[in-house]
């Protein structure tokens, strides 16, 4: 006689209802890590990436990808983590999701995309790996391996094969047997596809995007073993996945075409910028020159070539193409902002001010636009205007360290030494330079006017700096 136990009942429920749950966007995984443990693991993994790889710190590119990712996230069940999106400057075709919602995509894979549906397909699949906790379920909570070591193992898996930097991470990770046990299984891939397709189609994207990208990834391996993308080693069973996705498109009405209207311009502009600024320069030049030969009035072809020429230091030629791009699309704040940046670094501050003010009129929260406009005013001796712009900058972005440095300099120009020292103190505080931060905060206390709230704020900062300094000395002594 078969006795039903709680464990056997749970197993029966999982086997019976997993396919049904997955079809509605729910994962069947059980978890071996708590949310807090996974959050810490994700943070340590992120620190590995930041130490060893170059992330593309470009708000136009990252914000666009984040917008697509957040649109998909809005269709997911309540998540224990907030999703964050990053672009790694690597030509190798790769995308991966670290624990706790950190989703990475390589610039090489992103450059190979032709539309937003393809981007959504990759992001939806990686986000499903996080939602289904595929890494978390493979890590035994009882394991004696620490979270920092686990982060190194994961770095070796997901980043290996991507150049010298990632090779160094792989070499520093733990035993290959342990590493292999943390890779995705075919079952993980099937579940991520099924759940991820549900998310992205509910967000209005076509399942054709993921199908198209998997075909592109598969094609790369025909160029030779050294060209095999990391994606094919960390995400197995591509052929099976292609067959599954194609079948789903055939049997599910609407999955093969997007249900929301997508303006292709924003994707193409992001892609243009990525290739022009972060891709191989010769390849980018040939690409945009070819486009200009066919379509000389194409605003994005002019924009892309302008970025390439500026990157090469050919500023006058770049200005001409920026002007053409603006002529064809005069309200694009990104093109205006890049043109203003080019004028600034060429030392043409008057033109930079004019163009950057125009860009900010269309996009008033542009961080770099505020920063360069404030600096341009400083260069032309218009200190009061610089102060207003830089004050707006640090109010919008209080963690933008460089803003406090130039704001302090602007106050110094008008002999407001209290505010100058205060803002320089904030600059050095964020830089982690407690000695210089303390010096400027103490000077600010001596020369600031009668502002009780500000003075009390500075005293608290000095107290915190002294506490941090004593703690640091204690740690060095214990070593």
Image: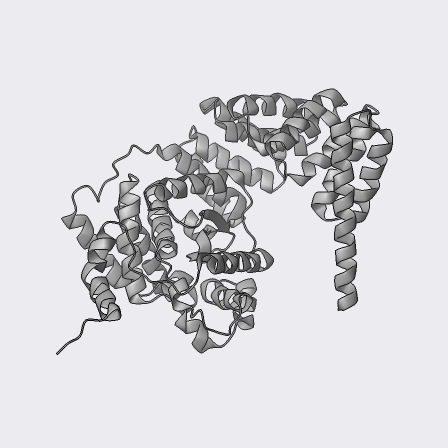
Residue at the (73%, 33%) spot, across then down: 406
Residue at the (37%, 44%) spot, across then down: 73
Residue 34 x/y as whole percent: 44, 60
Query: Is residue 224 visible to us here?
Result: no
Q: Is residue 104 left or right of residue 199?
A: right
Please give the count of numbered marks on the rendered protein. 0
Q: Quadrant of the N terminus?
A: bottom left
Q: Is residue 444 left or right of residue 363?
A: right
- Write down the quadrant of residue 221 in the picture: bottom left
Residue 150 x/y as whole percent: 50, 67
- Write down the quadrant of residue 277 in the picture: top right
Of 163 and 417, nearer the camera is 417
Residue 122 x/y as whole percent: 36, 51
Residue 115 x/y as whole percent: 35, 42
Query: Is residue 363 visible to us here?
Result: yes
Of 379 and 313, nearer the camera is 379
Residue at the (57%, 39%) spot, across then down: 309
- Identify the residue at the far left of this view: 1
Q: Quadrant of the C terminus?
A: bottom right
- Identify the residue at the far right of this view: 446
Q: In the rendered view, would you say 211 is above or below 174? A: above
Q: In the rendered view, would you say 311 is above or below 22? A: above
Q: In the rendered view, would you say 309 is above or below 386? A: below
- Colour mode of the rendering: one colour
């Amino acid at each position: 006689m078969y006795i039903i136990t709680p464990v056997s009942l749970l197993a029966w429920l999982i086997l019976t209802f997993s396919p049904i749950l997955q079809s509605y966007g729910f994962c069947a995984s059980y978890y071996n890590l708590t949310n807090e443990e996974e959050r810490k693991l994700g943070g340590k993994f992120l620190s590995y990436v930041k130490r060893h790889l170059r992330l593309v710190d470009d708000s136009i590119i990252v914000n666009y990808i984040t917008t697509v990712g957040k649109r998909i996230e809005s269709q997911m069940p309540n998540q224990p983590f907030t999703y964050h999106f990053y672009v790694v400057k690597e030509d190798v075709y790769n995308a991966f999701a670290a624990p706790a919602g950190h989703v990475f995509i390589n610039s090489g894979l992103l450059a190979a995309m032709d539309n937003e549906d393809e981007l959504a397909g990759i992001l939806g699949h990686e986000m499903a790996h996080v939602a289904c906790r595929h890494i978390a379920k493979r890590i035994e909570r009882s394991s004696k391996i620490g979270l920092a070591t686990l982060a190194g193992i994961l770095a070796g898996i997901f980043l290996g094969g991507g150049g010298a930097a990632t090779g160094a991470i792989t070499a520093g990770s733990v035993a290959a047997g342990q590493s292999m046990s943390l890779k995705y299984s075919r079952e993980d891939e099937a579940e991520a596809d099924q759940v991820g397709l549900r998310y992205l189609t509910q967000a209005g994207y076509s399942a054709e995007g993921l199908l198209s990208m998997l075909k592109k990834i598969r094609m790369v391996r025909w160029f030779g073993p050294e060209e095999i993308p990391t994606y094919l080693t960390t995400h197995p069973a591509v052929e099976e996945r292609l067959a599954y996705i194609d079948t789903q498109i055939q049997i599910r009405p609407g999955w093969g075409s997007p249900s929301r209207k997508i303006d292709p311009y924003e994707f193409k502009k992001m892609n243009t910028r990525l290739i022009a600024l972060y891709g191989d320069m010769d390849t980018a030049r040939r690409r945009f020159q070819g486009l200009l030969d066919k379509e000389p009035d194409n605003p994005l072809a002019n924009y892309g070539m302008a970025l390439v020429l500026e990157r090469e230091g050919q500023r006058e030629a770049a200005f001409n193409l920026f002007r053409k791009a603006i002529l064809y699309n005069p309200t694009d704040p990104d093109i205006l902002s890049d043109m203003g940046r080019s004028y600034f670094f060429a030392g043409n501050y008057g033109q930079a001010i004019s163009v950057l003010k125009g860009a900010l009129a269309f996009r008033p929260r542009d961080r770099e636009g505020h920063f360069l406009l404030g600096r341009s005013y400083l260069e032309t001796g218009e200190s009061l205007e610089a102060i207003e712009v830089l004050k707006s900058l640090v109010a919008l972005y209080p963690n933008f360290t460089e803003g406090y440095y130039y704001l302090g300099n602007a106050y110094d120009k008008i002999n407001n030494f209290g505010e100058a020292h205060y803002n320089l103190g904030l600059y050095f505080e964020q830089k982690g330079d407690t000695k210089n931060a303390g010096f400027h905060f103490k000077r600010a206390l001596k020369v600031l006017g009668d502002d009780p709230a500000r003075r009390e704020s500075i005293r608290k900062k000095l107290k915190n700096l002294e506490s941090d300094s004593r703690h640091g000395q204690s740690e060095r002594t214990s070593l």
